[in-house]
Amino acid sequence: MPIRDILQIGHPVLEARAAEVDVERIGTAQVQGWIEDLIDTMRAADGAGIAANQVGIPYRLFVMEVNDNPRYPYKPPIPLTIAINPEIKFLSDQTFPSNEGCLSVPQIRATVERHVEIAVSYHDRRGKKQSREVRGYSACTWQHEYDHLNGILFPHRVRDPKTFCSWSVFQEYHQAEFAEAVGRLVKRWGA
Ligand code: ZN
C-alpha cells in the first residue's frame, strides 16, 4: 500500500469537517485500503496518529500508534488503534497543557489545553462498535486526532501564542520539563 502525501495547514480538505463513513462499507477494499495507507503513512512519518483528511481522504477515521516514538519520546504507548466515526465525551473538567506538534504543521509546536479524562466510542476496522474510557496523556492524542475530523488543527486552539516554538528549540529548552509533566500525568493515570 502506498505512503501518501500529507496535506499541510491551510489546505481546504484539512480545514473542512470530514464526512461520516458508511458503516456498511467498512469491510470494502476501498475503506480497508485507506486504513492500510494511513498506517503506512503514519509509521513512515513517525507520527503518533494520522487522520484520513490529512492525506486527502475526507472521511471520519484516524489511526494512532505509539511505541517508543522518536518524535515524541515522552508519550506512553498506544496500541495500534483504528477509529472510524469516533465520538469523544469529556468526563471531567480537568485539563493538561499539552505541547503538541502535527504532521500537517511542519516545524512548529505549541501548547493547547486538553481534557485528561474522556470516553471514546468508534467503529473498529471490522465494523465493531467499541467504547471505553481513556485517561492521562493518551487522552490528549485522541483529542488531537478527533479535532482533525472537524477541521481543527492544534494552532487553532492555542491560547498563548508565546508557546509557539520550533522543534529544535523545544528539544533544547522545553522538552525535559514537559516530559516531567507528562511523566506525572502518566504516573497518576497509567497512560
Ligand atoms: Zn495532527
Image: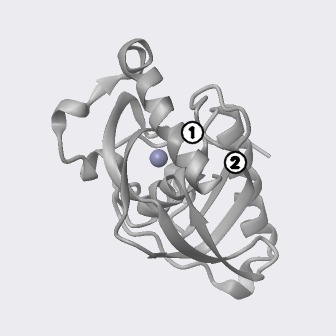
Q: Mark 2: which amino acid?
A: Glu
Q: Name the residue under label 2.
A: 65
Task: State the residue position of label 1.
Answer: 5
As measured in the structure, the alpha-carbon distance from the residue carrying label 2 to the one carrying label 1 is 19 Å
On the picture, is 176 further left or further right than 156? right
- Closer to the camera in the image, 171 or 117: 117
Does residue 75 sit above or below 27 in this rendering?
above
Circle 2 sits in a helix, a strand or a loop, which is it?
strand
User: Looking at the image, which residue is at 64% across and 72% down?
Assistant: 84
- At label 1, which amino acid type do we have? Asp
Disc nearer the start of the sequence (2/1): 1
Residue 174 appears at what percent x and percent y? 37, 22
Residue 37 drawn at (x, y percent): 72, 50
Q: Residues within 10 Å of mark 1 (few under 14, many from 20)?
A: few
Would residue 135 be found to the left or right of residue 169 on screen? right
Mark seen at residue 45: none
- Which quadrant would residue 15 be assigned to in this image? bottom left
Q: Is mark 1 on a helix, strand or loop?
A: loop
Res 121 quadrant in image: bottom right
Residue 34 visible to the viewer: yes
Quadrant assignment, res 72? top right
